[in-house]
């Protein structure tokens, strides 16, 4: 069945915060609410062998690897963690020469011991700010229209993406530049990521997603952070960010999903990027996530059954979300660097070294002519695709949001 491009992109990256109800004078309900928060925090935060206080205020808990959230899932009951892929194709790829190393802020204060994994601790403030105790860390399906105070509020998504479609793919590789765009309001976000997709939004979209994002509603600040996401049913009942639900199995003690980076690019200044790989292991069917040379962990195929054989679509690009009431103005939330693609290197955000991985687990560079594009509002955010010997196939993308051409 042909995938509806517009609808797929409208549901990628959605979050619907659910208002926490408060009733003045109703002490019983307030106590119940506090009890729910405590129970949820106990469920989310596993016992720590060691805790590291990051300079940005995060607490990173070093958790025994078999105590991680994945093992709360009944299908993981007898699961043996795979520490490395069996296929050499993933293991041996280093992604070119680098003169600097991107890390995460928490690493400046220590490291996790062997046989543990670093998990960002969820706080009471995180739960309250997100608006939903039960669905914390999850995206939600459409519709994304709210009615408050008699006024209709719509959640609007803008994208600048390139993709390959209607194929059989075993993964994706790209270098993604890191920026800190301005994100106007708490519930708005800005991100750069890759999507590995199969299925469709009607019968059940399966996606594996990773990149960087700024999302105050989830993390409590506006720092760019490494993230991962998955869904097996169009964001209906399955999937979550990072390790906020059972599903992703982490093996690395060096990388914490949801943690902030130690550096980001600046306009006309230093440029920072990272190599991100999502690749299916031929022998085990596990989808591995790799950051630079670090194997972070994997998604088993049984949580994304439509990706058990291969992906049908690979997407790279940027996305923002904002909320509009009636015929309001466009948001000032930025995408990428906050500057349009034509500004070029050191000024615009980029993806380079784009590759998709075929069913033989061989990386293939798509030519610019073979990439499709989705640009929802080119007057607000745009992209430019190119190729070079040094960067392979690449694209610049982004924009400021509201401007004279994007009122």
Image: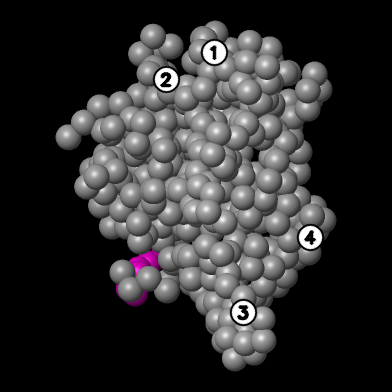
Q: Is residue 166 visible?
A: yes
Q: Which residue is mark 4?
A: 57
What's the CA distance linking mark 1 and mark 3? 51 Å
Residues at discs 4 and 2 in contact (Cβ within 8 Å):
no
Find out whether residue 80 is within the magenta segment: yes
Q: Are marks 1 and 3 in contact (CB under 8 Å)?
A: no
Check the image and name the residue furthest to the bottom. Answer: 28
Image point 48% across, 58% down: which residue? Answer: 138
Residue with the mark numbered 1: 384
Quarter assignment of residue 7: top left
Going from N to C along the chain, the mark reached first, 4 or 1, is: 4
Which is more N-terminal, label 4 or label 3? 3
- Of label 1 and label 3, which has the lower sequence position? 3
For disc 2, the marked residue is: 373
Report which residue position mark 3 lands on: 23
Q: Which comes before the other along the chain, label 4 or label 2?
A: 4
Helix, strand or loop at mark 1:
strand
Residue 14 point in image, percent of width and height: 47, 47
- Image marks 2 and 1: residues in contact by CB distance under 8 Å: no
Task: Look at the image and tell me in which quarter the N terminus lies.
Answer: top left
Disc 4 secondary structure class: loop
Dot 2: element: strand
Magenta segment: 76-83
Q: Tell me if residue 17 is in the magenta stretch.
A: no
Residue 214 point in image, percent of width and height: 65, 44
């Amino acid at each position: 069945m042909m995938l509806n491009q517009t609808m797929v992109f409208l549901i990628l990256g959605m979050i619907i915060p659910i208002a926490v109800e408060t009733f003045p004078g109703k002490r019983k309900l307030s106590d119940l609410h506090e009890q729910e928060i405590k129970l949820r925090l106990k469920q989310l935060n596993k016992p720590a062998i060691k805790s590291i206080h990051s300079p940005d205020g995060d607490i990173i808990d070093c958790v025994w690897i078999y105590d991680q959230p994945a093992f709360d899932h009944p299908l993981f009951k007898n699961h043996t963690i795979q520490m490395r892929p069996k296929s050499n194709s993933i293991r041996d790829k280093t992604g070119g020469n680098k003169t600097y190393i991107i890390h995460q802020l928490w690493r400046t204060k220590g490291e996790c011991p062997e046989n543990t994994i670093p998990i960002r601790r969820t706080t009471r403030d995180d739960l309250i700010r997100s608006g939903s105790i039960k669905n914390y860390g999850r995206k939600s399906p459409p519709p994304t229209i709210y009615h408050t105070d008699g006024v209709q509020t719509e959640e609007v998504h803008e994208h600048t993406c390139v993709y390959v479609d209607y194929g059989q793919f075993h993964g994706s590789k790209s270098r993604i530049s890191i920026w800190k765009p301005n994100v106007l309001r708490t519930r708005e976000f800005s991100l750069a990521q890759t999507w590995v997709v199969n299925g469709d939004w009607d019968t059940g979209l399966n996606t594996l997603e990773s990149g960087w994002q700024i999302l105050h509603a989830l993390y409590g600040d506006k720092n760019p952070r490494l993230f991962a996401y998955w869904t097996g049913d169009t964001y209906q009942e399955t999937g979550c960010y990072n390790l906020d639900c059972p599903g992703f199995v982490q093996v690395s003690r060096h990388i914490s999903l949801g943690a902030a980076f130690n550096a980001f690019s600046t306009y006309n200044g230093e440029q920072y990027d990272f190599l991100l790989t999502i690749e299916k292991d031929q022998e085990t069917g596990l989808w591995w996530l790799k950051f630079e040379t670090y194997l972070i962990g994997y998604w088993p195929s049984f949580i994304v059954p439509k990706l058990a054989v291969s992906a049908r679509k690979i997407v790279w690009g940027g996305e923002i979300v904002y909320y509009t009431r009636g015929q309001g103005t466009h948001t000032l939330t930025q995408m990428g660097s906050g500057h349009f693609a034509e500004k070029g290197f050191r000024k615009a955000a980029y993806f380079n070294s784009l590759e998709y991985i075929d069913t033989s687990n061989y990386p293939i560079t798509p030519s610019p002519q073979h990439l499709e594009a989705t640009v929802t509002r080119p007057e607000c955010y745009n992209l430019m695709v190119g190729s070079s010997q040094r960067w392979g196939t690449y694209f610049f993308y982004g924009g400021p949001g509201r401007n004279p051409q994007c009122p």
